[in-house]
């Protein structure tokens, strides 16, 4: 699938519906990604703010990775690096670790 052909507005609508039926933190995280694709990284980052307070996601590497990615998109590499380092400190698989390390390298600072 060509990434440019993804119907992000439809995906956001579907996540809105799913979130109304099942307001889990993982659904909210995925909704924030779709929101960022439709309305921009600042809105996606704002949607993550409430998830920071959820103890079920406190050490969830994907929340931290999404934050890092959105911060990179906003041109805030130092903050993104902090998020990626925090994600790397969490439990995750080796392929996820390699991905996070590549993202951290994109931030331009020392590892």
Image (cartoon, helix red, strand yellow):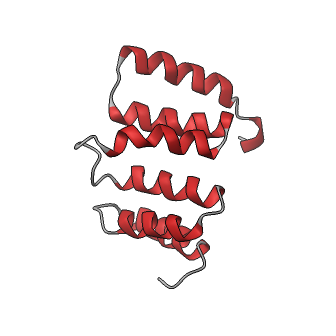
> For this view, does 106 lie left or right of residue 98?
right
Residue 2 on image: x %, y %: 75, 43
Give the residue furthest to the bottom: 110
Q: Quadrant of residue 71?
A: bottom right
Residue 99 on image: x %, y %: 50, 65
Above-or-below relation of 58 to 21: below
Quadrant of the drawing holding the N terminus: top right
> For this view, does 85 lie left or right of residue 42?
left
Residue at 37% x, 36% y is 26
Give the residue furthest to the left: 55
Above-or-below relation of 44 to 87: above
Residue 109 on image: x %, y %: 55, 81
> For this view, does 5 lie left or right of residue 82?
right
- Can residue 86 be seen in the rendering of this structure? yes
Residue 107 on image: x %, y %: 58, 72
Residue at 24% x, 42% y is 56
Residue at 31% x, 68% y is 89
- Can residue 95 be seen in the rendering of this structure? no
The residue nearer to you, when weighing 53 against 105, is 53
Above-or-below relation of 64 to 42: below
Q: Quadrant of residue 42?
A: top right
Q: Quadrant of residue 91?
A: bottom left
Residue at 35% x, 62% y is 93
């Amino acid at each position: 699938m060509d990434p440019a052909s993804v119907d992000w507005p439809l995906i956001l609508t579907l996540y809105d519906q799913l979130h109304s039926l099942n307001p889990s933190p993982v659904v909210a995280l995925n909704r924030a990604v779709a929101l960022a694709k439709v309305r921009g990284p600042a809105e996606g980052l704002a949607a993550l703010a409430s998830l920071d307070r959820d103890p079920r996601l406190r050490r969830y590497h994907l929340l931290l990775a999404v934050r890092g990615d959105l911060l990179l998109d906003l041109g805030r590499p130092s903050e993104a690096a902090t998020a990626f380092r925090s994600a790397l400190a969490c439990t995750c698989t080796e392929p996820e670790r390699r991905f996070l390390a590549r993202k951290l390298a994109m931030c331009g600072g020392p590892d």
